[in-house]
Image (tube, helix red, strand yellow):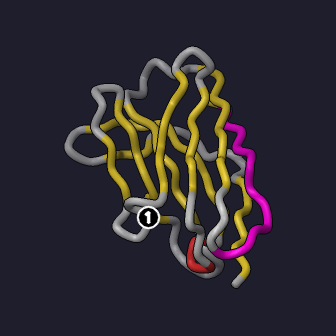
């Protein structure tokens, strides 16, 4: 079992920045990659960005160039630096532990998420 606690969300204006954090505890050794997902109201959860221990990173086309995913292995904490935020970035953001093999496969349970709301 893995415990994931996301934080850092909030209500911000278009064009501003936020940094999300995800603290992970529990059995983490079965994962070789981590990711951020988001879910807008009445929409499916979508992969935003992933980072693998081998260094491979993926960004959804809608956030590429604006978001940066990183991980502090010593602190078991995943980050998502979000800049130039747009109203379409609004949603609940969740972190995930998983497996990377040419693409990211989520394996862990989900945390409670952190809400990001971008006003126009």
Q: Is residue 115 magenta?
A: no
In the image, taking residue 97 as reference, residue 39 lies left or right, namely: right
Q: Residue at x 57, y 35 (%)?
A: 78
Image x and y of residue 51, in percent: 39, 39
Image x and y of residue 45, in percent: 52, 66
Q: Residue at x 65, y 78 (%)?
A: 41
Q: Look at the image and tell me in which quarter the C terminus lies.
A: bottom right
Secondary structure at badge 1 equals loop
Part of the protein shown in magenta? 3-14
Dot 1, how many residues are within 10 Å of its Cα: few (below 14), some (14-19), or many (20+)? Answer: some
Is 102 situated above or below 32?
Answer: below
Magenta stretch: helix, strand or loop mostly: strand
Q: Residue at x 46, y 58 (%)?
A: 48
Which image quadrant for residue 54? top left
Q: Is residue 4 magenta?
A: yes
Is 15 situated above or below 25?
Answer: below
Is 75 situated above or below 91?
Answer: above
* Residue occupied by mark 1: 63
Farthest residue, direction bottom = 120
Image x and y of residue 109, in percent: 58, 42
Q: Residue at x 52, y 38 (%)?
A: 108
In the image, taking residue 118 as reference, residue 40 lies left or right, namely: left
Image x and y of residue 34, in percent: 45, 38
């Amino acid at each position: 079992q893995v415990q994931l606690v996301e934080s850092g969300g909030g209500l911000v204006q278009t064009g501003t920045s936020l940094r999300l954090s995800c603290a992970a505890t529990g059995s983490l050794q079965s994962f070789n990659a981590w990711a951020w997902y988001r879910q807008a109201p009445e929409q499916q959860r979508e992969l935003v960005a992933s980072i693998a221990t081998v260094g491979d990173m993926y960004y959804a086309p809608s956030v590429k160039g604006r978001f940066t995913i990183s991980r502090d292995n010593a602190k078991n904490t995943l980050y998502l630096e979000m800049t130039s935020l747009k109203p379409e970035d609004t949603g609940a953001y969740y972190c995930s532990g998983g497996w990377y093999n040419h693409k990211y496969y989520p394996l862990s349970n989900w945390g409670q998420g952190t809400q990001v709301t971008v006003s126009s």
